[in-house]
Amino acid sequence: MKAVFSGSFDPITRGHVDIVERASHLFHEIVVGVAVNSAKNGIFTMDERVAFVRDAVKDLDRVSVAPVDGLLVEFCEAHGADVIVRGLRFGGDFDYELQMAHLNKAMGDIETVLLPAGREFGTISSSMIRSAAANGGDVGAFVTPMVDAALRARFGA
Ligand code: COA
């Protein structure tokens, strides 16, 4: 089966990488879809986010990366994906994920598979990483070296 792992990845964290890596053992092929969440104000452009994700998954077999332009279900159809994969960190994620899963099922007749986030990075989020970095925190343990360098450049750390 082919899966799409979607997210806004602003920026990608080691928690996301953990999900892609584990999903790559479950599915024949993974396409990481870098999308826009219209409810969020991020800091990195689509091109930057795609570049960070490509770098983060470059050593994983059968994993590719592409920007999502429009609806996720249309992206899934264009890529011939059978399922959407999302990571689930804690209870708070569940309601949101269920809503999205139902919407995507209704709009595109596609199932969503939720993978429990790994214990090591299971509670971090992109906005927390951005906030810590903006205030001079060292977030190197939670992101790839490329993202760490970009955050340092952005916030002058
Ligand atoms: N490790 C680390 N962080 C994780 C994580 C994990 N395993 N799982 C979730 N997160 C965090 C993310 O860092 C992110 O944090 P943030 O809120 O601080 O940014 C948050 O949980 C979830 O964000 P993300 O996975 O990037 O998803 P999203 O909710 O921002 O994106 C889209 C949702 C982009 C996939 C959705 O809006 C979409 O499909 N957009 C395209 C348009 C569309 O089709 N809309 C209708 C369907 S909803």
Image (cartoon, grey):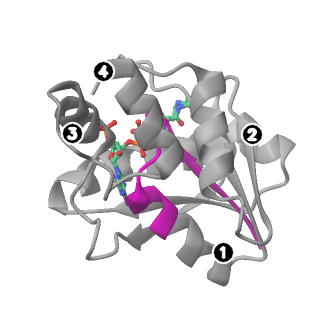
Q: CA distance from mark 4 to mark 3?
A: 14 Å
16 inside magenta stretch: yes
Q: Amino acid at mark 3?
A: Met
Q: Earlier in the sequence, mark 2 or mark 3?
A: 2
Q: Name the residue at the front extreme.
A: 157
In the rendered view, does 31 fall on the left or right side of 94?
A: right
Kind of residue at badge 2: Ala
* Residue 155, label in figure: 4
Q: Which residue is mark 2?
A: 66
Cβ at disc 3 under 8 Å from ligand 1: yes
Q: Amino acid at mark 1?
A: Ser
Compare residues 151 and 71 and report the one nearer the observer.
Answer: 151
User: Dot 2: within a 10 Å radius of its alpha carbon, few (fewer than 14), some, or many (20 or more) residues?
Assistant: some
Query: Residue 156 lies in what quarter of the image?
Result: top left
**Nearer the camera: disc 2 or disc 3:** 3
Horizontal and vertical percent position of residue 36: 53, 25
Q: Amino acid at mark 4?
A: Phe
Q: Tags 1 and 3 in contact by the CB under 8 Å rule?
A: no
Horizontal side of 24 relative to 78 (left or right) equals left
Residue at 24 percent across and 33 percent down: it is 133
Segment tinted magenta in the rendering = 1-18
Residue 15 percent across, percent down from the top left:
38, 61
Q: Nearer the viewer, residue 1 or 103?
A: 1
Q: Which residue is mark 3?
A: 128
Choose the circle earlier in sequence order: 1 or 3: 1
* Nearer mark to the viewer, of 4 and 3: 4
Task: Give me the C-alpha separation between circle 2 and circle 3.
Answer: 25 Å
- Confirm or deny contact between disc 2 and disc 3 (CB under 8 A): no
Identify the mark nearer the N-term, 2 or 1: 1
Which is more foreground, mark 4 or mark 2?
A: 4
- The mark that comes first in sequence, 4 or 3, is 3
Residue labelled with disc 1: 24
